[in-house]
Amino acid sequence: MKIDQIAVIDIGSNTIRLVLYKYDVKRGMKEIENIKVVARLRNFILPDGRLSDQGIAELQTILETFKEMLHDYGIEDVLATATAAIRQATNGVEILEKMKKEIGIDIRLLSEKQEAFYGYFAVVHTLSTPSAVTIDMGGGSTEVTYFKDKELVYSHSFPFGSVSLKQQFMKGDTLTSKERQRIYQFAKEQFLSLSWLVGLGLPVIGIGGSARNMAKMDQRKKDYPISGIHQYKMTKEDFDAIRLEIAELSFEELKQLDGLSSDRADIIAPVLEVFQALMDVTQSPIFQFSRKGLREGLVIEKILKKDPNAFDKYHVFESNVDFLAQEFGKSKEHNEYFTSLCEKVYREFCQHDALHYSDEDLATLIQAAKLFYLGEYIDTDSASQHTFYLLSNRSIDGLNHKDRVRLALLASYKNRDEFKRYVTPFMTWFTEAELKQIQGMGALLKFAYALDASKRKIVQDIAIERKDQGIDIFIHTRGSALAEIYRVNRQKKHIDRLFLENVNLHFIEREG
C-alpha cells in the first residue's frame, strides 16, 4: 500500500507554516505535523509598497529552516504558496525568484480568487453543510465565498486582514470602543458592497486561526465535554457574548485568556468585529468553524488529480467512516457482512415493533456497525470505553458534534449502566425519545455483534415470529454456531427489554 507524504508551506501575512500530510487510499488524509512561525510579514511592508530587506531576511531564514526539516522528514513533494503579504508587495515577484534561486523552493503566488477557492474547496470536502458563506481572515486579506449545494457561486477577496486592520484603526494593543465601532462600520460597508451576501440567512463558516480561537473560547466558557472545533457551531447570541467579553479585556488580560493564542491577543478583537459585521449583513443565525482551509484545499486538489474518487464532497461522512474503520483494523469485506446482518436485524425488529423504523436511523445504524467496538484495536477487555472516547473526541469530517456523540454511543454500546455513564455529560443534547431510540439501536448492535462472535459469517438469515407465548427469533446458520449461541444468550436480556416480553431464540443449522 503506497502512502503519499505531502508538505505545504503556507506563507501568510501573519504566520508562516509548514504542515505535513500523509494519504493512502484506505485511511484517507491525515495531518501529521504542523509547525507555525508568527512572522507578521505585513508589518514589513514599506510606505512605497515594497517588503523591506528585514522582512525578506526573516522569510528566508524561516524557509531555510523548513527546508532542513523537510530533508530530515524525507519529504520531497512540497506545495509552497504565498498569499496577501507577497501578493501586495511591489517586489513580490523578485522575492519569490530570490527564494527559488537561493533556497531551491519554488513558491506559487496565489491570486485572490485562488486563495478564496481553496478555502471553499476544503470546507465542502470536510463538512456536511450543503450551503453557507465562508470567511477566511488572514493578516493582509479576507476571503469570502458563497456556495450552494456544495457548488461555488461567488467569491471575493478584500485587501484587508487582521494585521492591516490593526495598523489602520488601532493606536495601541487594546481596542477602544470608538475603534471597535469604526472597524465594524468599515467591515459592514465592505460586505454590503457585495449584493450576493446580503440577507442570505445561511451559516457563516469561519476558517483560520482567529475563528479557531473563537470556538475554543466558547467551548471553555461552556465547559464543553468533548474536544475538537472542526464543525463546531455557535449561535449568534453566544457569538455576541464572547465578542463583548473580549471587548472588555485589556491586552495583558487577553494574553492570559484560556483558549486564545497569545500571539493573537492584539488582533482578535478587530477580527471579531469583522465576523460580526458579516453575520449581520448575511443575517446568519449560526457561526460555524472549519479547521480545514487553504492548505487542506491544496492537498485535496492534488490528491483528486491523481485519484478522482479519493474524496466525495456530497458524501463526506460516509467516506470518512470507511477510512476510520480501516485505520482501526476493521476489514472492509467483513464490515460488508456485518452491516448487512445489522440491517436484516433492524428491519425485523422494526417490523415487530421493537424499534421505530426510519431511513435516517437505518443509515446511522449502518455507519455505527462499521465502527462497532473499534476500541478492540487498543484493548479487547475495555473495547467499549476506548470506542466511546475515540469516536466522541475525534474529529470526523462530515459529522457535527451531536451526531458524533450519537455515533459514539451506538458504536460503544455495552449495557444500560455504561450507556448512562457515557451519556451523562450530554443529557441536554438529546430528547428523551432520542435517547430511548439510541439505547435500543445500541442494544440491537450488541445483539448482532454476538451473532458474529466467531467472525466466521455463520449467520445467514434471521426471522421473527410473534406467538402467544412471546417472541420467537429464528437464526439460520451455516455450520456450528457454538460461539454465537453462547454470546447471544448473554445478550438476551437486552432484547427482552426491546420487545417488552419474553424472547425465545432458535438456532437452525442448515446443511451444506
Image (cartoon, rainbow, N blue to C red):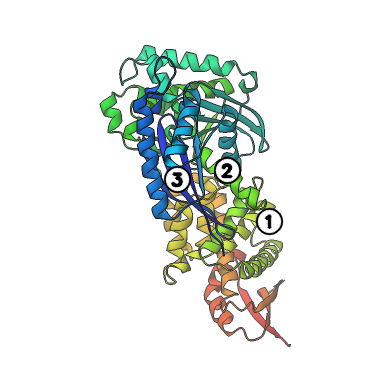
Q: Nearer the viewer, mark 2 or mark 3?
A: 3
Residue 143 position (above or below residue 108): above
Pick out the residue farthest to the right.
512
Residue 136 x %, y %: 51, 31
At numbered mark 3, what does the secondary structure look like: helix, strand or loop? strand
Q: Is residue 431 visible?
A: no
Residue for badge 2: 127
Residue 206 position (above or below residue 436): above
65 displayed left or right of 485: left
Q: Earlier in the sequence, mark 2 or mark 1?
A: 2
At numbered mark 2, what does the secondary structure look like: helix, strand or loop? loop
Q: Quadrant for residue 298, please give it.
A: top right
Check disc 2 and give the amino acid type: Leu
Q: Is residue 155 visible?
A: yes
391 displayed left or right of 312: left
**Residue nearer the viewer, 388 or 267:** 267
Residue for badge 3: 19
Residue 393 x %, y %: 44, 52
Mark seen at residue 357? 1
Please rate how many residues cluster around mark 3, counting C-alpha atoms within 10 Å: few if below 14, some from 14 to 19, many from 20: many
Locate the N terminus by quadrant.
bottom right
Residue 67 x %, y %: 41, 46
